[in-house]
Image (cartoon, rainbow, N blue to C red):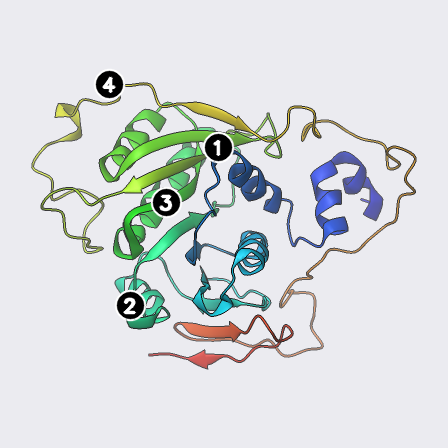
Amino acid sequence: MGKSSKDKRDIYYRLAKEQGWRARSAFKLIQINSQFKVLDGVKRVVDLCAAPGSWSQVLSKALYSDSDDKDDVKIVAVDLQSMAPLPGVVQLKGDITKESTANEILAQFDGGRLVDLVVFDGAPDVTGLHDLDEYVQAQLLLAALNITTYLLKPGGTFIGKIFRGKDSSLLISQLEIFFGDVVVAKPCSSRNSSIESFVVCRDFRLPDGYTPTMANPLMTNDSRSWDEMDVHRVITPFVACGSLSGFDADKTYPLEIDGLQYTQRNPVQGPIAPPYEKSKPLITTKGMSIVQTPIDQGATSTEQPLD
């Protein structure tokens, strides 16, 4: 496949390179924020399953540019994969299903303060078997929700990727236990042919008597079974995000648009340690590691092994 072929097939892939985003998924968060204003007044954010870092890029650009006191802003990105440093973003290498990861995230905020916003754009390597992909994605979303119960302040917001399927209503019902307002959003940059959407969950509050725990699957300590619960007595809103006159993610565009000359560009961020790079030694890290890149410095990094 030639370098320019994907640029022609996927307009958002091309725009991501032109605008300096690491992945086309950056436009999804941008369009969600344009619809719901989820970044207004936000200072402390956690980005779960953050690699390669496009959502952290959006968060860093938005929060630091809008803040009068940049010292109040804190962005923590978490992933099992290594990620190239980003200015103003603290990176943790850890498993979001572990309580130790939740504690380490809170330790990055002064005095273990709870955060204003948690975002999650993780997804499995899809197989094409929709039932399997939907199930694995639902488990990832529940894992993200589980760690969010440790991190999010009352009234906070959670945004997570969901694959819509026959069991989506049950999954959304679980989210509605923890949030007063749940909306399913479909950004215009998400292909119509894709089953992905995003849940925008606002007004967080822990249910009475519920204590966050990762020892068991979510909500298994509830005395009621899901069969006894009233699933979806109301219809959850479904909202399209982004300008209707904007680019269509499923359409093929010519390389020259509105008379502008096309320039071929390489990806913004190359792979960290590709398998084909045999001549260079690979760096491996056991356990969790931290990478901190100050906003006022370049993209340099230091890595520190933890227990």
Label located before the other in sequence (3 or 4): 3
The residue where tag 3 is placed is: 157
Residue 239 in view of the camera: yes
Q: Nearer the viewer, mark 1 or mark 4?
A: 4
Q: Are marks 1 and 4 in contact (CB under 8 Å)?
A: no
Q: Which numbered disc flags the more N-terminal residue, 1 or 3?
A: 3
Contact between marks 3 and 2 (CB within 8 A): the answer is no
Nearer the observer, 163 or 207: 207
Viewer-side label of 4, 2: 2
Q: Point out the tag, 4 or 2, that comes first from the N-terminus.
A: 2
In this rendering, the count of numbered labels is 4
Q: Residues within 10 Å of mark 3 (few under 14, many from 20)?
A: many
Type of the residue with mark 1: Ser
Say which element carries label 1: strand
Point 68% across, 60% down: residue: 269
- Observer-nearest of 277 and 82: 82
- Residue at label 1? 197
Q: Which quadrant of the structure image shows residue 218?
A: top left
Residue occupied by mark 4: 233
Report the side of 106 relative to 33 (left or right). Answer: left
Q: Is residue 143 left or right of residue 248?
A: left
Which of the two labelled residues, at mark 3 and mark 2, occupies the earlier sequence position? 2
The mark nearer the N terminus, 2 or 1, is 2
Inspect the image, locate mark 2, and give the three-letter code of the amino acid beneath it.
Gly
Callout 3: helix, strand or loop?
Answer: strand
Q: Are marks 1 and 3 in contact (CB under 8 Å)?
A: no
**What amino acid is at disc 4?**
Arg
